[in-house]
Image (cartoon, helix red, strand yellow):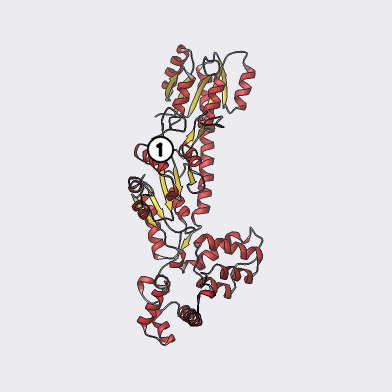
Amino acid sequence: MKRGSILILDDDESIRSYLSNFLLTCGYETESFSSGADAIRRIGSGAPPDLLLLDIMMPGLTGLEVLAQAKRIDPALSVIILSGVGQIKTIVQAMRMGASDYLTKPFDNEELELAIENVLEKRSLRDEVRTLRRRLDLCATQFDLLSSNEKMTRIKEIARHVADFDVPVLILGESGAGKEVLARYIHTQSKRADRPFVKVNCAALPNDLLESELFGYDKGAFTGAANDKPGKFELANGGCILLDEIGEMSPQLQAKLLHVLQDGEYSRLGARRSIRVDTRVLASTNKCLKDAVAKREFREDLYYRLDVIRIEIPPLRERPEDIPLLCNYFLQKYGALYNSTSTTLPPDLNERLMRYHWPGNVRQVENLIKRFLILSDVESVLTDLTRTEPAAPPLHAQNLKELGAAAAEKAERDAVLRALEGTNWNRKLASEELGICYKALLNKLKKWNLDNRARTSHAASAPVEAEAAVPF
């Protein structure tokens, strides 16, 4: 059984041969190099070793220079320094730079094996702690989106099913609907859950900066590039990368991303060599990528590479039954943080929230609950909701007849909503209460874009509309 991989860097061939043969008998996989530059290329190839045995005194790149570059590529890399007598000052400097231990030549087999076992055991413990912390963090975020909606329950089932298949997932939905939460849920359910989850907002950076952020750069690639910098794809190696708002990515970067998806490798800016990575790609956008492809704003070949599994999250206005769940969740989540004793919302605010159209989706609910807990002022929250309602046409553009018609329609819409809410969105009972036929009510709901809301909200009218609360 292999106990780990060890890279040996020493310019003395006899020492390399001795170390390699001995470590192989101990059950370790080994690779040997005589050149610091070759060893750095190997470490940066996308699959770094578990341990580096590093000779301090070498021609070309010195041991300290190799240590510095190796740590920039993989900060978690364990390094044991092999030094000669009288190099205490250099050893101290190496330990400050991140070396795990040192051995003074000549050393015996037992001393070497014990040092390696201790270093790898510490690395294993660090990895275990990091994994547990990451799982706790992910568990804390994966239930930020609650739902009793049938569509959302189905989405969760799909996400759980595709989690362990290393294929791209394209997540569509309006801003604030929960695309990142869904991406994190997929990651936590996958076999990569103990590896990094890295998010990159493709709309937040100019294209030049986004390229260096995604793919990194080598020292000297451009003015100010004083050191090598790994990109997000390298940092996410073995785990997942979420390309948020991918519809904003430039055609040049789209071509480079396509190459990564096809071959699993790319080059840093200014680099002469390729880096191979094993990173699962999840992508999200609030754009219609099909339309972008038709307008030649998004590469068709990249679209079909990403569109292996497509999940579209419905906006909150199409699942109003989730509003009370979300409000209660955020009240519990932030109540203690903001020193608030409020555990429920006032009835008038609850009623208003159920009638609101929520253009900012779940994120807007979260911000509103924070505002309520901090200010404890229902009126200010209601005023803010009124400000963000769809604006009416300017008065100067309307005559009295148009104003009267608009006012009448608004009053009619409010009366219909009150009747529906009073009957738990039972459209048949609401139409009888309003004194209109059932078909007329359906036409009005369709006209006001409330037909989807009616379908998802009316839990009592038909079995297909009855839903159980499922945290998501």
Question: Element at badge 1?
Answer: loop
Residue type of the residue flagged with mark 1: Asp
Label 1 belongs to which residue?
Answer: 278
Q: Is residue 190 visible?
A: no
Q: Nearer the viewer, residue 400 or 95?
A: 400
Q: Position of residue 170 (x, y in %)?
A: 39, 51
Q: Position of residue 295 (x, y in %)?
A: 36, 52
Q: Residue shown at 34%/53% (left/top)?
A: 294
Front residue (pair 9, 433) = 433
Q: Is residue 403 left or right of residue 171?
A: right
Report which quarter residue 95 is drawn in. top right
Counting from the top left corner in percent of width and height, residue 252 is at 41, 41
- Residue 257: x and y in percent read 40, 41
- Residue appearing at x 41%, y 29% in the figure: 2
Mark 1 nearby-residue class (10 Å; few <14, some 14–19, many ≥20): some
Compared with 379, 127 (above or below) is above
On the picture, is 166 further left or further right than 197? Answer: left
Q: Nearer the viewer, residue 110 or 318?
A: 318
Location of the N terminus by quadrant is top left
**Residue 157 visible within the image:** yes
How many marks do you count on the picture? 1
Q: Is residue 422 above or below residue 101?
A: below
**Residue 68 drawn above or below residue 431:** above
